[in-house]
Amino acid sequence: MTSFDASPQLNVWRALAALAVVFVMLATSGWTAIHSHRGSSALASSRSAWERGTLAGHPLPDADSAPGVLARFFASLDAGQRDRLAHRYPLAVGNMNGAPVELRYTANRLALEKQRRVERGRMHDNRLSELGQHEAGRRMHRYEDLLEKGREILAFDPRGGGRIAEVFGDLDTAERVSVVVPGVDTDLLTFQRTSKKYSAPVGMAQALYTAEHSASPATDTAVIAWADYTAPSGLGIESATAMRAEDGAVRLNALVRALPGDSSVVLYCHSYGSVLCGVAARKLPPRVSDIAVSGSPGMRADTAEGLRTTAQVWAMRDSDDWIQDVPHLEVGGLGHGADPVSAAFGARVLSARDAKGHTGYFEPGTDSLHNFAEIGIGSYGSVDCARPDDACRTGLSGGSSA
């Protein structure tokens, strides 16, 4: 808990007043939305069918087995057997850490096609309200977008607001992998946007992938737009606590540990996504070389060293980002702790010039995107520090940034 030079009672009242400011800021800054959480889990049904299934008379391995165990199982099969499993259990295979990524893409395409048919039927279901039919239409059109040729969907769960992850580049051959971890109100329908394209996970990842390739065409990179966790929705307790971050941290760690090969991994954590990355930090494998946060309300730690990670920790905040007015404190589980761009926190503070406020860190032409790309390709000496006298480039031969 943050300490104050005042009585404990006064400290509590100050903290509560500060948190009230947080809620007001969230309400007026686009963190509110309405999500429907309807229906049973199609993913759970697919996993249950997998658990009962057999192949050539033998039971299938536990879907929750370690990625290495599942990788060896799939490697033991021929192409026809793998394809049959993807068609029988598309959601289970499409979300299975350890399954070959190309097989996951195939399985998720099958799952998306099925869900598109479901939502097309719901669009004309007279048992639904007009609003329900409209919602079905929105989801059906999003599935059509995701089914466009060339899109590679690494994870997909249609339940509730929906979870999704998409890959740009080749995960199997990439030397360096970047993972974009977005914040509040991220779901299937907000995964990509036409207006304010670079404020949504797909636009963020596309911009980063392009910038990395431009910075170093010879470096084989891949970028994952990762919205495969249930983000907090709307104004409420979820966005002021680590509840969703804790669940998401488990999923993020599982993703990183299941990535093929031995590529290094960089996490780009925006807004509430930085809370998730902070919670995940201590259990991240050594292959995660860097954690870069932007527009962060806090990382649930007092210092970068307190994250207990070997990854280098970077932070940035645009001068017009409203998050700077949110009190950086934690009281009784509410709030997310110290400001990552403060000198006391100990992160490497990067320039975010021209970032266009809270949602503009991945806009092409900004210092923030330039810095993200240089970190993504491992070119630490080319990053722009937030201050001319800042030593954010020094001591980068490995280990923590603290």
Image (tube, rainbow, N blue to C red):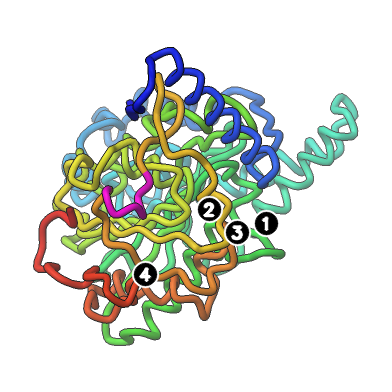
Q: Which dot, 4 or 1, sits closer to the camera? A: 4
First along the sequence among labels 4 and 2: 2
Q: Residues within 10 Å of mark 4 (few under 14, many from 20)?
A: many
* Magenta residue check for 80: no
Q: Where does the image place residue 54, in percent across and percent down from the top left?
A: 32, 30
Q: Is residue 167 left or right of residue 193?
A: left
Marks 1 and 3: CB-CB under 8 Å? Answer: yes
First along the sequence among labels 4 and 3: 3
Looking at the rendering, the stretch of residues picked out in magenta corresponds to 339-344
Q: Which quarter of the figure has residue 95?
A: top left
> Which numbered tag is attached to residue 147?
3
> Which numbered tag is attached to residue 144?
1
State the residue position of label 4. Answer: 386
- The Cα atoms of the two marked residues, 1 and 3, are separated by 5 Å
- The Cα atoms of the two marked residues, 2 and 1, are separated by 10 Å
- The Cα atoms of the two marked residues, 2 and 3, are separated by 7 Å
Q: Is residue 113 left or right of residue 96?
A: right
First along the sequence among labels 2 and 3: 2
Q: Amino acid at mark 2?
A: Arg
Q: Which dot, 4 or 2, sits closer to the camera? A: 4
**Residue shown at the point (21%, 58%) measured from the top left:** 312
Secondary structure under tag 4 reads loop
Q: Amino acid at mark 4?
A: Ala
**Residue shown at the point (58%, 38%) measured from the top left:** 158
> Which numbered tag is attached to residue 173?
none
Q: Where does the image place residue 45, in percent across and percent down from the top left?
A: 49, 26
Say whether residue 87 is visible.
no
> Which numbered tag is attached to residue 109?
2
Q: On the rendered image, what quadrant is the N terminus found in?
A: top left
**Residue shown at the point (38%, 40%) measured from the top left:** 276
Marks 2 and 3: CB-CB under 8 Å? Answer: yes
